[in-house]
Image: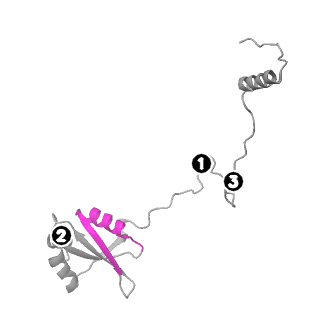
Amino acid sequence: MAKTTNTPKTSAGKSAAKLSKKVIKGAHGKVLKIRTKVHFYKPKTLQLARAPLYPRKAVPSRNKLDKYRIIKSPLTTESAMKKIEDNNTLVFLVDLLANKRQIKDAVKQLYDIKVAKVNTLIRPDGQKKAYVRLTADYDALDVANRIGVI
């Protein structure tokens, strides 16, 4: 596109020339963002994934709560036996730091059974007790026999 060098003489022609120049070059005016809040929050910037040159720990820490530490022992009291017979529920003493999900996974791995739900309580002597309810396709009496509770 060739540039025209003719200069307009009227004021309307001058403003039209300015406008055409602006359209060709593009508007470069700075527009300030209107801030409506009192506090300025720093915008989130790109955080690249870290690629360390060497590990900060020589040896990674091992999992302290493995399945054998989570389940301490089955409980063989009369009330526990009643739970086995009536509610299809096994009762275990478990580690104090174990949560319900960890207890469920540990029972699943150790005894090859499916768990419906886990209820926990902390006894007055400071130990944690877990009521492990089995699914309908497993019988708690058979599992208790296999474990050696009965």
Determine whether the residue tagged by mark 3 lies in a helix, strand or loop: loop
Which residue does the numbered mark 3 point to in the structure image? Answer: 35
Q: Amino acid at mark 1?
A: Arg
Q: Amino acid at mark 2?
A: Val
Cα distance, mark 2 to mark 3? 67 Å
Is tag 2's residue or tag 3's residue first in the polypeptide sequence? 3
Considering every residue shown, the one lying at the far bottom of the view is 124
Is tag 1's residue or tag 2's residue first in the polypeptide sequence? 1
Instruction: Give the residue drawn at x 71%, y 12%.
Output: 1
For this view, does 3 lie left or right of residue 116? right
Instruction: Please state the extent of the stretch shown in magenta in the rendering.
Output: 97-121
Badge 1: how crowded within 10 Å, few (<14), some, or many (20+)? Answer: few
Instruction: Give the residue drawn at x 83%, y 20%.
Output: 10
Which residue does the numbered mark 2 point to in the structure image? Answer: 143
| Residue 82 image offset from top left, x and y in percent | 17, 82
Which residue does the numbered mark 1 point to in the structure image? Answer: 50
Pointer 1 and pointer 2: residues touching (CB < 8 Å)? no
| Residue 77 image offset from top left, x and y in percent | 23, 85
Instruction: Give the residue drawn at x 62%, y 51%.
Output: 44
Q: Is residue 77 above or below residue 2?
A: below
Q: Choose top left, top right, bottom left or bottom right for residue 135.
A: bottom left
Q: Amino acid at mark 3?
A: Arg
Q: Is residue 31 above or below residue 74?
A: above
| Residue 23 image offset from top left, x and y in percent | 71, 25
Q: Nearer the viewer, residue 87 or 72?
A: 87
Q: Nearer the viewer, residue 99 or 19?
A: 19
The label nearer to you, 3 versus 1, is: 3
